[in-house]
Image (cartoon, rainbow, N blue to C red):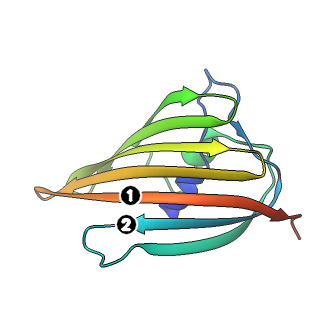
Amino acid sequence: MLILRASLFLAAPAVFADGIPIEPGLWEITSTMALPVLSEPRVASVTECMERSEISMDEVTGEGMDPDCSFDISQVGDSAMKWSFDCPVNGGSSHGEWEAVSAGDSVTGKGVMTMTFQNQTMEMTIGWEGKRVGDCP
């Protein structure tokens, strides 16, 4: 779930004052994760109240994220972003490439994360879709 939240709560560092716009309210977010060790992709859905009108980097690098991770925003537009991260993992490392597109009341995205530890490499792909479904309770 942390990967999903990190994937959705993206945005820009100080040089990019704005993130990507979202409409505040109650959101339903569905993610699909595929790993080579799984016989079929895992699908998970969450419903969450989004109170901000844009998604900022503070949420990505905030609570629960390793302070040794580095983030690189490669593209920020009015409604789309691409970014990557590198993080240490016990005995190895992880690298991710992500992108997201917002239409204000919906967001889609995808990413690939490669983890290397104990001379083994595993790649995980994640796709997600989110849509505003109403007002927060």
Within the image, what quadrant is residue 61 found in? top right
Q: At 13% from the left edge and 59% from the top edge, which residue is drawn? A: 118
> Which residue lies most toward the left here?
119
Q: Residue 112 or 137: which is nearer the viewer?
A: 112
The amino acid on which the numbered mark 2 sits, given as a three-letter code, is Ala
Would you name the residue on which mark 2 appears?
34
Circle 1 packing at 10 Å, graded few (<14), some (14-19), many (20+), is some
CA separation in Å, label 2 and label 1: 5 Å
Above/below status of 1 relative to 38? above
Q: At 57% from the left edge and 36% from the top edge, which residue is drawn? A: 81
Would you name the residue on which mark 1 appears?
125
Callouts 2 and 1 close, C-beta under 8 Å: yes
- Location of the C terminus by quadrant is bottom right
**Mark nearer the N terminus (2 vs 1):** 2
Q: Which mark is residue 72?
A: none
How far across and how far down the image is residue 134, in percent?
A: 86, 65
Q: At 57% from the left edge and 44% from the top edge, which residue is drawn? A: 100
For the question of whether residue 64 can be seen, the reply is yes
How far across and how far down the image is residue 41, in percent?
A: 40, 73
Instruction: Classify mark 1: helix, strand or loop.
Output: strand
Q: At 43% from the left edge and 66% from the top edge, which residue is drawn? A: 33
For the question of whether residue 70 can be seen, the reply is no
How far across and how far down the image is residue 1, in percent?
A: 52, 67
> Which residue lies most toward the bottom here?
39
How far across and how far down the image is residue 128, in percent?
A: 55, 59
